Amino acid sequence: MTVPPAVPVLPLRAMTRLLAEMQTTIVGTALPLFDGRVDRFMIFTLLVRRMLDGGRPTPVLAIADSLGLPFETTRRHVAELAAGGWVGRERGGIIVHVGVEDGPVATLATLTHDAMVRFIADMRTIGALPAYPAPVRPYHWHAGLAAAADLMLSVASTNHQTHHDRLDLVLFSTVLCASNRAITLDPALSRMYAGFDIAPPEGWKRPVRARRIAATLGLSEATVRRRIDRLSEGPLEAVDGGLVPREAWLSSPMAQEASTASYANLRRLMGTLAAQGFPFGDPTRAYRIRRPEPASFD
């Protein structure tokens, strides 16, 4: 397949929109499995990532340090994961007790992988990724699942200064996903507004209501409304019809710095994935099942 020409600017807006699509697809499926607790899901993601590397048991303190969580918070979440049969304690720490090929994790693991493949395919369509050499080794989907976990973990870490709480980051990302659909799903518009040099017209944003955010993520409406009251003082703006991202916040130096760091991490992770045989020339070959449908807000 022909490699599309690179976008003429750093594609930070396009990356952020497509990451929001990826995260909303994954988190909307994952949170009901983890009692709506984003930190619990991220702890499990970290442990799965280490399992894919054949990792040894991870001490609770190391989990807390890796994710920037308080030790007691981490310990409580690990205890709940253990009670649910997701993880177990072994000598030296915590280890995942369920595989990614079967059981309750299989569907989520496949969706996570395919949502990342969709992200890569859409980034490639608009010329927002560099060209990679043809693969010289067979691709295994576990490599893509590991890359998806790394990407989600790195985005959460990079945005720690802009969103001090992971649930706040998820809510912001979900509003961004819903409000930018007209641009995200149109490759020509996505390419046109790929960078921070040109802001999309305000009329393109589609407001989304708190109840729809709650339904998409499987959270209580009360929890979402309580968090949004705080977010509306910063990254989100209340308008007629619901919520949209605040443009002044999106284009602030702090937000752009976080996006630039995320893009650097993305380039590094994609380079590693290319070396593991991912078919960047035609990403659609990597789907385990199919391209996931976008999360619904209707």
Image: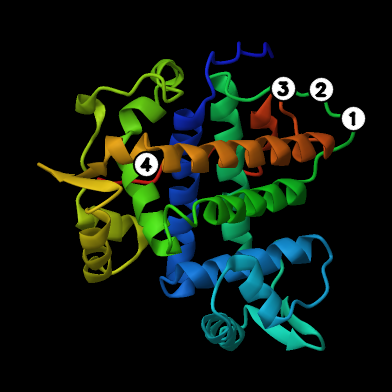
Give the mark nearer the N terminus: 3 vs 1: 1
Return the residue found at the far right. Answer: 136
Q: Quadrant of the N terminus?
A: top right
Q: Which residue is mark 2?
A: 133
Q: Nearer the viewer, mark 2 or mark 1?
A: 2
Residue tagged by mark 4? 177
Q: Which residue is pictured at 23% across the width and 36% down the height?
A: 206
What whole-number distance in Å separates the C-alpha atoms at marks 2 and 1?
9 Å
Query: At label 1, which amino acid type do we have?
Result: Val
The reply to whether discs 4 and 2 touch (Cβ–Cβ < 8 Å) is no
Left-right relation of 255 to 45: left
Q: State the residue in front, 228 or 149.
A: 228
Quadrant of the image occupied by residue 265: top right
Instruction: Report the residue marked by disc 3.
Output: 281
Horizontal and vertical percent position of residue 297: 28, 46
Query: Marks 2 and 3, how far apart in space?
Result: 8 Å
Question: Circles 3 and 1: CB distance less than 8 Å?
Answer: no
Q: Secondary structure at mark 2?
A: loop
In front of the other: 199 or 205: 199
* Residue furthest to the front: 253
Sequence-first tag of 4 and 1:
1
Gap in Å between the C-alphas at discs 3 and 1? 12 Å
Q: Residues within 10 Å of mark 4 (few under 14, many from 20)?
A: many
